Image: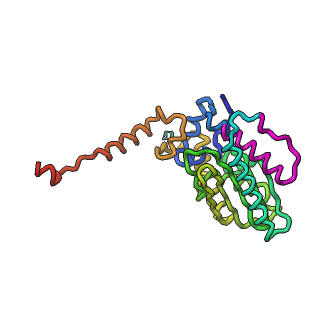
Amino acid sequence: MPTKHAVLSASSSYRWLACPPSAKECAKLPDTSSEFARQGTDAHTLCEFKVKTALGQKLEDPTKSLTYFDEEMAECTDEYAQFVMECLAAAKVSCKDPLIMIEQRLDFSKWVPGGFGTGDCLIVADDTLTVIDYKHGLGVLVDAEKNPQMMCYALGALNLFDGIYDIRRVSMTIFQPRRDNVSTCTMSKEELLQWAETVLKPAAELAAKGEGEYKAGDHCRFCKIKATCRKRAEYNLELARYDFAVPSTLQDEEIEA
Ligand code: SF4
């Protein structure tokens, strides 16, 4: 199913930060959405419904319209809604009227050309901004520590709220129930802004122009051109050479033989 994504999306930032020209290379190919991605979309729809319902909103239950709904999805999204409500309750301990936003569009184009995304849940309580992202995937355990997708979302949220609130700290949490993973990274606003100016913005500018160095690595698994990329082929060959490197001197067992 063709879909439309920002060329420099937050979700692909892990890749284009490491290999800036990959952004334009990937943009040349049509967007396709996998079954896993569609499953994730259904789970997000249910998460949104459950959290908003827990917050007291009256909404129509979307379950019947979901293609991938199953018992596990029901449980995971319940857990997520409960987690969000616990975070909100914790925020209320120090702030009598925290702000919570669900499925909020976040614009971080100040640092990344055309950069936007959707934050699953934002909580602003006095000087702390909390960003929570639900991951339905099982394949990759997602760590919040210095996670560029979360940092882009946090920048988008800062863009919305800084000035209205005196935010000093940003807390970013990945909630990945199918892996029993709740991962949180907290940093100061200054640290986040420094990363945005010195790492994110320069890489995004290169990526937007299709410039910068091709660099292969773990991030290639998320690249649409990985099957035909010369840099990746060279990298894999190098790894293979390393794996099969034969020592220049005979080993004891070889001498014995
Ligand atoms: S496969 Fe890897 S090295 Fe090649 S363009 Fe994609 S991210 Fe860059």
Measuring from the top left, give residue 149's x and y in whole percent.
63, 50
Residue 79 versus residue 137 in the image, above or below: below
Measuring from the top left, give residue 140's x and y in whole percent.
55, 47
Measuring from the top left, give residue 214's x and y in whole percent.
48, 42
The residue positioned 56% from the left and 51% from the top of the image is 141
Quick one: quadrant of the N terminus?
top right
Residue 15 versus residue 229 in the image, above or below: below
Q: Is 90 or 169 nearer to us in this picture?
A: 90
Figure disc tally:
0
| Main secondary structure along the magenta-highlighted residues | helix
Q: Is 126 or 69 nearer to us in this picture?
A: 69
Q: How is the image coloured?
A: rainbow
Residue 154 versus residue 41 in the image, above or below: below
The residue positioned 36% from the left and 40% from the top of the image is 237
On the image, which quarter does residue 174 sit in? bottom right
Q: Residue furthest bottom?
A: 94
Residue 181 inside the magenta-drawn segment: no
Left or right, residue 21 beside residue 165: left
Left or right, residue 54 beside residue 146: right
Measuring from the top left, give residue 8's x and y in whole percent.
64, 42
Q: Residue furthest front?
A: 71
The residue positioned 34% from the left and 42% from the top of the image is 240
Residue 56 inside the magenta-drawn segment: yes
Left or right, residue 205 beside residue 105: left
Q: Specify start and end residues of the magenta stretch as a single range.
A: 39-64
